Image (cartoon, rainbow, N blue to C red):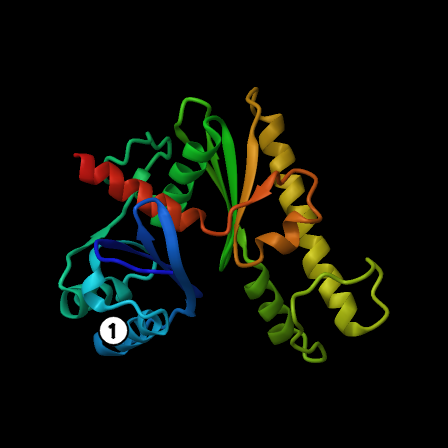
Amino acid sequence: MTIRGGLLLVIDVGNTNTVIGLYDGETLCEHWRIATDAQATTDELGVLVLGLLATRDVKRDAVAHAICACVVPPLIHATRRVCRRYFDVEVEFVNAAQDLGMPIRYKNPSEVGADRIVNAIAAYRSVGGACIVVDFGTATTFDVVSGAGEYEGGVIAPGMGISLDALYQRASKLPRVEIVRPTEAVGRTTITSMQSGIVYGYVGLVDGIVQRIFDESDESFVVLATGGLAGLIAGESRFIDRVEPFLTLEGLRLIWEQKKRG
């Protein structure tokens, strides 16, 4: 792929992973997922990002703009300095206190994480109506958007990874296991029993919460899933309509376009 200048660098800094993308207009031309390190210095992050771009033969001066959703406060300053020092651009940080074109019905709108409102904006633009976003990250979050395009609120549950870690740490005889779909619900080994519990347990959690949201509303929702483990759960869920792996990156692009239009 030929990469020309004027690219938009989009950065989603989560508690566990950071997803980085490059947009050429409306096209996501490159993307990477790396582990989030809250202790990383500006230079460590800068060298890492430049290295990722170099693997795709993208020069640093091809990046003309940058926008970021960050839920790890120690990395806000480092990300800003990376963009200034290595790309000579000022990065825009998204937060719920900004006018993003979506009314937020939380009692305290500033409590809504940047990634959640970004997801909601992207989902509403994609669906064009009422929708629910299930994001499988460090936490498993549910974000509800009305047909009128208002962020109604949501649900926050422990994520699959930290739930499994807690089980390993608190039960001395249980091992660390990979999160994969078991072949049957009834495990025949400790490992497959744990895998069944985490995978089918979260399928039940997702479908149970979505059903309650349905029951509390007169609207008809489209349910989107995103995050690293979205595909695993979506294949078993009764309610998830489709998986959008780059929903947050697309939301950042849409917000950037809106800001550019003024």
Which residue sits at x=72%, y=54%?
Answer: 200
Q: Nearer the viewer, residue 257 or 186?
A: 257
Quarter of the rendering containing residue 185: bottom right
Q: Is residue 145 visible?
A: yes
Quarter of the rendering containing residue 35: bottom left
Tell me: 256 left or right of 192.
Answer: left
For the view shown, which residue lies furthest in the front direction? 2
Residue 23, how many percent across, how many down?
A: 32, 52
Pointer 1: residues within 10 angstroms few (<14), some, or many (20+)?
many
Return the residue at label 1.
46
Which residue sits at x=47%, y=26%?
Answer: 129
Q: If the image is split into quadrants, where does the N terminus sit? A: bottom left
Residue 44, how many percent across, how many down?
A: 27, 78
Q: Nearer the viewer, residue 16 or 215?
A: 16
Label 1 amino acid?
Answer: Gly
Q: If the image is split into quadrants, where does the C terminus sit? A: top left
- Mark 1 residue element: helix
Tell me: 171 left or right of 81.
Answer: right
Which residue sits at x=68%, y=49%?
Answer: 235
Q: Is residue 207 above or below residue 45?
A: above
Residue 136, how many percent across, how many down?
A: 53, 54
